[in-house]
Structures are given as structure tokens and as C-alpha cells.
Image (cartoon, rainbow, N blue to C red):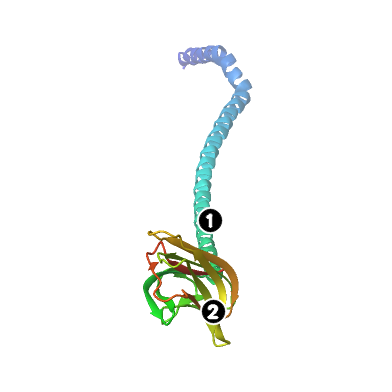
Amino acid sequence: MMGGAPAVAGTWSRLAEVVGTRGPRTGFLREHWSLLFGVLALVVAIFALVLVFLLGLEFSKLQEHQDREVQNKWMKDDAQGVNGAHQESLVQRMRRATLSHNKRRTSFIHLHVKRKRTEGRLTYFDWEKAEGRGPALSLSSDLNSVKIEKTGFYYLYGQVLFIDKYFTMGYIIHAVSDDHNEPMPLLRCVENMPNRSNIFSTCHTSGIVRLQANEKIVLEVPRRDAEINIDHDSTFFGVIKIN
């Protein structure tokens, strides 16, 4: 028993030395543990904040990309809608303009000679339509006159190339209708023929007159069997509605 006592005492002595040796370090840790824990917590918090910031930045980029796609889609849809509406509006305006133009467009008729014929002391022409449009004018069924379909002011013109040897040649443009028994002269052209063997003389006249619906406009030469060049660029007749 007495031998064991020194051993125990030696053990405690060594433990005391150890404790005495490590005591200051253990005391430092105990004294600064709260500071170390605070620093560690601060580091963890900063890391968490950085992570949250990075995640938020990526989320913002993703949201911005999605918003841009949605905005582009809306803009594309709006553009298609605007273009469709603009095209439809343009087509409607063009259709209205065309209809309006067709309603007020100028009526005219230009005639070439189909054949020359004689009745009594007069020379007449059977005409054929070279150009023309509009509802106000038409070539009569007997081919020798222009029929007026609408009352208004008209520009008349005519030309005849004579190759006759008579000293004076010419023609008359007159109106015929049921309202007056005799032809009503509208325009007249008279040409003195040259006194030589090769006789060519163009007689041209034109003017503005007011005509009534259902009147017929006739061009006639007051001479039997008049010699006339009936080429299309030499002898012609036309009427244009001007209002």
C-alpha cells in the first residue's frame, strides 16, 4: 500500500506539469473562443451573401432574357398586326380611289374611217372605234355617228385629208336628235385647195360645245364623191367629255 502511494503521487505530479504546461494555451482558447466563433460566423455570412448575390445576378439575367423574348414576341405580333392593318387600309384606299376615279374618269372616243360612202350630194363615213372608254359616249349602230349618252360639255375634233381638184373643200360636224328636225351645225372646216396637179390639203377643226343626251354627232362632206385619203393618220374624228 505504501508503495502505491508514491506512484499515485508521481502521476498527479506529471499531470500537474502537463496542465501547467498547456494551461496557458487552453486558457487562451477559452478566452478568445467567442472572438474566433464570431470571425467564423462572419466569414460564413459573407460567403452566404456572395452566393446569394451571384444567384440573384444569374436570376436577373435569366429574367431579363425571358422578358426580352416576351417583348420581342409582342413587338413582332404588333408589327404583324400593324402591317396587316396598314395593308388592309391601303387596299381599301386604293379600291375607293379606283371606284371614285371610275365614276369621274374622262369619257372619250377616237374613230378611224372604215369606209367612205356617198348619199345624194354628200359624202359620209362609216367609222370604226380606234380608242375609247367611259359611259358617256358610244359609236352608233349605223357606224356613221357618235351617240351622246350623258348631257354635258364636250370637246369635238375632226380632220380630213382632201386630194380633190375642186378649189374649195371642207366638212361640217353637226348634231342630230329628235328635239330638232334639221341637223344643227356645231363646227365647220373649209380649205382652199392648191391649184396644181398633186393636190393634198388637210382640214382640221375642233371646239367645245354643250350636248344633250341621245344626240348623235355626224361628220359629213358637202360634196358628192369627194376624193379623200382615209388613212388612220390622215382622216379621223373624236369626242371627249370634259366635265
- Image coordinates of residue 207 in percent, x first then y, are 57, 67
As measured in the structure, the alpha-carbon distance from the residue carrying label 2 to the one carrying label 1 is: 63 Å
Kind of residue indicated by mark 1:
Asp
* Residue located at (54% from left, 79% from top): 175
Say above or below: 41 vs 100.
above
* Residue located at (57% from left, 15% from top): 25
Q: Secondary structure at mark 1?
A: helix
Say above or below: 148 vs 102.
below
**The C terminus lies in which quarter of the figure?**
bottom right
Instruction: Depth check: give the residue in front, 164 or 88.
Output: 164
Instruction: Depth check: give the residue in front, 54 or 159.
Output: 159
- Judging by the rendered image, the residue that carries numbered circle 2 is 175
Instruction: Depth check: give the residue in front, 218 or 118.
Output: 118
Local crowd size for mark 1, using a 10 Å CA cut-off: few (<14), some (14–19), many (≥20): few
- Image coordinates of residue 142 in percent, x first then y, are 41, 82
Q: Quadrant of residue 211?
A: bottom right
Say above or below: 119 vs 206.
below
Q: How many marks?
A: 2
Kind of residue indicated by mark 2:
Ala
Q: Are marks 2 and 1 in contact (CB under 8 Å)?
A: no
Local crowd size for mark 2, using a 10 Å CA cut-off: few (<14), some (14–19), many (≥20): many
- Judging by the rendered image, the residue that carries numbered circle 1 is 78
Of badges 2 and 1, nearer the viewer stands: 2
Q: Secondary structure at mark 2?
A: strand
Residue 23 circle label: none
* Residue located at (54% from left, 14% from top): 22
Q: Quadrant of residue 201?
A: bottom left
Instruction: Depth check: give the residue in front, 2 or 55.
Output: 55
Residue 95 appearing in the image: no
